[in-house]
Amino acid sequence: WALAVLGEIVDRGLLQAMQSRATVTAGQFDPQGVSNLMWALATMGERADPGLLEAKQRRAMATAGQFNSQNVANLMWALAVLGEIVDRGLLQAMQSRATVTAGQFDPQGVSNLMWALATMGERADPGLLEAKQRRAMATAGQFNSQNVANLMWALAVLG
């Protein structure tokens, strides 16, 4: 996460070593760790090793009930940016969790989640779409121009 935020050029060997270690220790990651790792890879424009992606998707499924709104939005955004094929069960689990935690989403989270679903070509569950629209209405005064543009694009794509 820190390397992605700093925007530093990272040694390829270090990235490989950290991805390998993250794969081995996947079962120890909490939801924030899973989402931060995937967010960092997406932010750095790095593809996840296939083993790491599979391990993180399994871990996300196992801990889906513990994800908060930011964890859900960050993970879904990262998977969409990385262009990865996402396990159907994980998509369903994250949509369900996003519906349960809908009241916790900030404008960026709402727009990023909906953008991610639209980018991945996924239909939002009706309950999720309704919950996100309610949340967007409740927080409309806090949306910045990028949040507005991303949400409107996502809604247009999602139909």
Image (spheres, grey):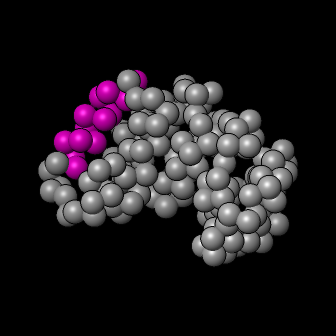
Locate residue 25, reporting x and y percent: 32, 27
Q: Which residues are magenta?
A: 15-27
Number of numbered markers: 0
Q: Is residue 97 above or below residue 155?
A: above
Residue 141 as seen in the image, left or right of residue 86: right
- Is residue 115 in view from this perspective? yes
Indicate yes or no whether the magenta region holds residue 37: no
Task: Tell which residue pokes out farthest to the front in this image.
Answer: 141
Q: Nearer the viewer, residue 106 or 158?
A: 106
Which residue appears at 37% of the width and 52% of the height? 40
Image quarter in which the C terminus is found: bottom right
Q: Is residue 158 above or below residue 61?
A: below
Q: Nearer the viewer, residue 95 or 67?
A: 67
Locate residue 68, reporting x and y percent: 59, 37
Q: Is residue 92 above or below residue 109?
A: above
Which residue appears at 27% of the width and 60% of the height? 6
Q: Is residue 131 above or below residue 10?
A: above
Q: Nearer the viewer, residue 148 or 15?
A: 148
Locate residue 53, reporting x and y percent: 42, 42
Indicate yes or no whether the magenta region holds residue 25: yes
Q: Quadrant of residue 144?
A: bottom right
**Main SS class of the magenta portion in the image:** helix
- Is residue 84 in view from this perspective? no
Which residue appears at 68% of the width and 43% of the height? 104
Which residue appears at 56% of the width and 45% of the height? 70
Q: Quadrant of residue 5?
A: bottom left
